[in-house]
Image (cartoon, helix red, strand yellow):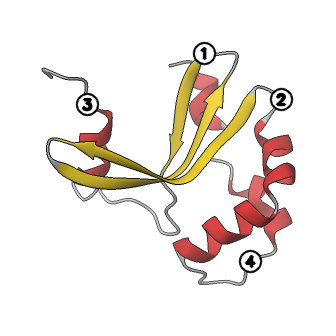
Amino acid sequence: MQPEAFNVFKDASMLEFLDLPEGHAEADLRRALLLKLRDFLIELGRDFCFVRSEYPLQVGGRDFALDLLFFHRGLNSLVALELKVRPLRAGVPRETRVLFRSPGS
């Protein structure tokens, strides 16, 4: 994946237009993004297309739901957003890692 693709999601200021209160939950973030989807897509850039919210996915016999799923035309690939409102700690996001492992890895 291109390095600049990761950087767009690290900038918390790009979500200021949501006007969420301090200490909001992930469900609040997802709801606000969906209500202002047009503005969010403009912030992401012109190559992003919304696919679905809470996209069901089964990996290794386990059920998951991707918070937001997009298609990026420039990269010609799907982009899954797993929304987190607090910093990730090393070793904790095991479920997220399993979603992005390739078969046989």
| Mark 1 or mark 2, earlier in chain | 2
| Mark 1 or mark 4, earlier in chain | 4
Q: Nearer the viewer, mark 4 or mark 2?
A: 2
**Residue drawn at 68 percent across, 49 percent down:** 11
Disc 1 to disc 4: CB gap under 8 Å: no
Q: Residues within 10 Å of mark 4 (few under 14, many from 20)?
A: few
Q: Residues within 10 Å of mark 2 (few under 14, many from 20)?
A: few
Give the residue at mark 2: 46
Residue toward you, 67 or 63: 63
User: What percent of the width, then of the height, locates residue 96?
Assistant: 32, 48
| Mark 4 or mark 3, earlier in chain | 4
**Residue drawn at 72 percent across, 34 percent down:** 49
Q: CA distance from mark 1 to mark 4?
A: 32 Å
**Mark 3 belongs to which amino acid?**
Arg
Q: Quadrant of residue 71?
A: top right
Residue toward you, 10 or 96: 96
Q: Secondary structure at mark 1?
A: loop
Give the residue at mark 1: 76
**Residue drawn at 25 percent across, 24 percent down:** 102
| Mark 2 or mark 3, earlier in chain | 2
Q: Is residue 16 visible?
A: yes
Give the residue at mark 3: 101
**Mark 4 belongs to which amino acid?**
Leu
Q: CA distance from mark 4 to mark 2?
A: 24 Å
**Mark 2 belongs to which amino acid?**
Arg
Q: Secondary structure at mark 2?
A: loop
| Mark 3 or mark 1, earlier in chain | 1
Give the residue at mark 4: 20
Q: CA distance from mark 2 to mark 3?
A: 28 Å
